[in-house]
């Protein structure tokens, strides 16, 4: 089922300024869904620069030679992060390009990735004790299917999510995916947690509410997400809207 070329956010594989020491990179489309139908999802990674020019690479997308050179101009890649079990595909490429970096993986990534992740990596299993603690808050959000690790870059007040919120723009979707996005509660400008994902948190509803309240308490200025249009301003309002079904 073909999707419009405009599904992606050109230019691809290019560092884009978000805030001081914060960049996003819009990557290629991936095909995801049930065995049939599968839909085209735009991808996005986030890079944060910490003290001493250390770079924190979140949910890496495709690595091209030009992108590698651009990243190397901004600092040294120290950490490569797989924030949930679905976001790991390009990690081996980044690890090979930056062998001095440490890889951190959310729970169940190894189970999902199989032989693709066959190297040493640390587990993201807590909210503290990481080398980036002085500048980035870490928050595991656990559901039955997966745990997503949420990050908050305090200097720029940037909240970095992956799949907890999706925000697909109707004009970038084909008719079938547009309907699915609307029914799933992830159609911009009022994107949110996909309804099927909500079901996987039904046993952790109160823990999820506590996690969302903590994100709100951080008072993010912006929210970067992996799929769809990210939220450039009014991060708190976006969180309250996206999780209104949970907060009441």
Image (spheres, grey):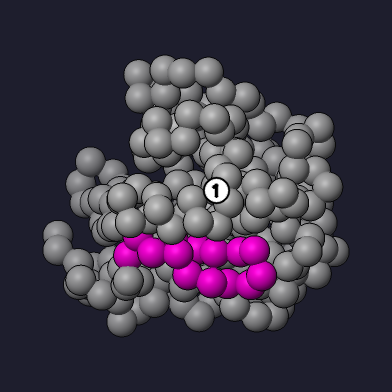
Residue 131 placement: quadrant: top right
Which segment did they paint magenta?
12-25
Q: Position of residue 163 (x, y in %)?
A: 52, 53
Q: Residue furthest front?
A: 73
The residue drawn where x is 85% and y is 64% is: 217
* On screen, residue 32 above or below 193: above
* On screen, residue 119 above or below 7: above
The residue drawn where x is 55% and y is 57% is: 74
The answer to whether one can see residue 210 in this image is yes
Q: Is residue 69 left or right of residue 149?
A: left
Q: Main secondary structure of the magenta part?
A: strand
Label 1 neighbour load within 10 Å: few <14, some 14-19, many 20+: many
Foreground of the two, 184 or 172: 172
Q: Is residue 166 left or right of residue 97?
A: right
The residue drawn where x is 39% and y is 77% is: 169
Q: Position of residue 159 (x, y in %)?
A: 68, 61
Q: Position of residue 244 (x, y in %)?
A: 68, 69
Foreground of the two, 88 or 21: 21
Please tell me how many numbered marks the rendered image carries. Answer: 1
Q: Is residue 219 left or right of residue 238?
A: right
Q: Secondary structure at mark 1?
A: strand
Q: Position of residue 56 (x, y in %)?
A: 61, 47
The residue drawn where x is 32% and y is 65% is: 12
Q: Is residue 89 left or right of residue 200?
A: left
Foreground of the two, 13 or 129: 13
- 8 magenta-colored: no
Q: Which residue is mark 1?
A: 58
Residue 246 placement: quadrant: bottom right
Q: Quadrant of the C terminus?
A: bottom right
């Amino acid at each position: 089922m073909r999707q419009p070329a405009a599904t992606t956010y050109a230019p691809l594989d290019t560092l884009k300024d978000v805030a001081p020491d914060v960049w996003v990179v819009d990557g290629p489309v991936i095909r995801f869904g049930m065995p049939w139908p599968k839909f085209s999802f735009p991808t996005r990674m986030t890079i944060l620069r910490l003290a001493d020019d250390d770079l924190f690479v979140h949910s890496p997308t495709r690595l091209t030679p030009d992108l590698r050179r651009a990243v190397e101009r901004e600092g040294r890649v120290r950490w490569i992060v797989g924030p949930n079990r679905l976001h790991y595909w390009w990690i081996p490429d980044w690890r090979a390009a930056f062998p001095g970096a440490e890889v951190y993986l959310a729970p169940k990534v190894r189970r999902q990735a199989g032989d693709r992740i066959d190297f040493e990596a640390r587990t993201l299993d807590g909210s503290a004790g990481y080398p980036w603690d002085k500048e980035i808050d870490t928050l595991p959000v656990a559901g039955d299917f997966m745990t997503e690790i949420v990050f908050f870059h305090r200097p720029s007040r940037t909240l970095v999510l992956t799949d907890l919120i999706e925000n697909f723009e109707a004009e970038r979707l084909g008719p079938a995916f547009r309907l699915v996005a609307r029914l799933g509660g992830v159609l911009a400008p009022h994107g949110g947690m996909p309804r099927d994902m909500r079901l996987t948190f039904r046993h952790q509803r109160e823990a999820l509410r506590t996690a969302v309240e903590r994100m709100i308490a951080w008072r993010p200025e912006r929210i970067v997400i992996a799929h769809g249009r990210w939220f450039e301003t009014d991060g708190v309002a976006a969180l309250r809207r996206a999780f209104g079904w949970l907060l009441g």
